Image (tube, rainbow, N blue to C red):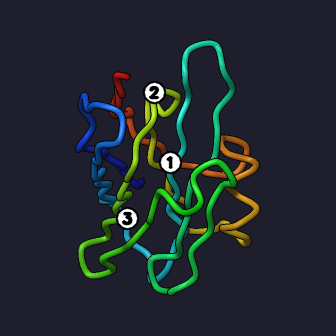
Amino acid sequence: QVQVAESGGGSVEAGGSLRLSCVASGATYADHCMGWFRQAPGKELEGLAAVYTAGDSTYYGDSVKGRFTITRDAAKNTVYLQMNNLKPEDTAMYYCAADPYLQSCEKGLNRGRDVFGYWGQGTRVTVSS
């Protein structure tokens, strides 16, 4: 069983930055896909970024390209989401997800809960104008 835990959310003014962290613990695998998602009130889950813990390739949703950066620390089973130039429309609950069997980390961003097996409880990000 894999446990996923996010941290780092908070309140920030527009134009500010936040860094979210996500740790996957429990059963460990040599490589697994970890991704960041968000869900704003009344909206669907949106895939933001994903990366393989043992690889260098990163994948991004169109809405955050150029502003958000996903990085990983394989030794710690941790991924980070650096969010810059935050906008009020970035306000949402942010979730981290992990899956050791996902064949396409990139496609997983579009399929969310259908393919990622392990999810954190979420961390809230509020951006004020």
Residue 129 versus residue 120 in the image, above or below:
above
Name the secondary structure under disc 1: strand
Residue beneath the point at 50% across and 51% down: 36
Residue 47 versus residue 105 in the image, above or below:
above
Give the residue number, with chain letter if any, for mark 3. Answer: 27
Query: In the picture, residue 121 is in which quadrant?
Result: top left
Q: Residues within 10 Å of mark 3 (few under 14, many from 20)?
A: few
Q: Residues within 10 Å of mark 1 (few under 14, many from 20)?
A: some
Residue 4 versus residue 32 in the image, above or below:
above
Give the residue number, with chain letter if any, for mark 1. Answer: 118
Give the residue number, with chain letter if any, for mark 2. Answer: 88
What label does residue 7 carry, if any? none
Residue beneath the point at 54% across and 63% down: 66
Amino acid type, callout 2: Pro
- Distance from disc 3 to disc 2, alpha carbons, whole Å, reads 37 Å
Amino acid type, callout 1: Tyr
Work out whether mark 1 precedes mark 2 in sequence or the reverse, and give the earlier one: 2
In depth, the one of 58 and 120 nearer the eye is 58
In depth, the one of 18 and 34 nearer the eye is 18
Residue beneath the point at 57% across and 52% down: 64
Work out whether mark 3 precedes mark 2 in sequence or the reverse, and give the earlier one: 3
Residue beneath the point at 34% across and 61% down: 80
Query: Percent x, y for residue 67?
Result: 48, 57
Work out whether mark 1 precedes mark 3 in sequence or the reverse, and give the earlier one: 3
Query: Percent x, y for residue 77?
Result: 32, 70
Name the secondary structure under disc 3: loop
Q: Is residue 46 left or right of 8 when viewed as pictured?
A: right
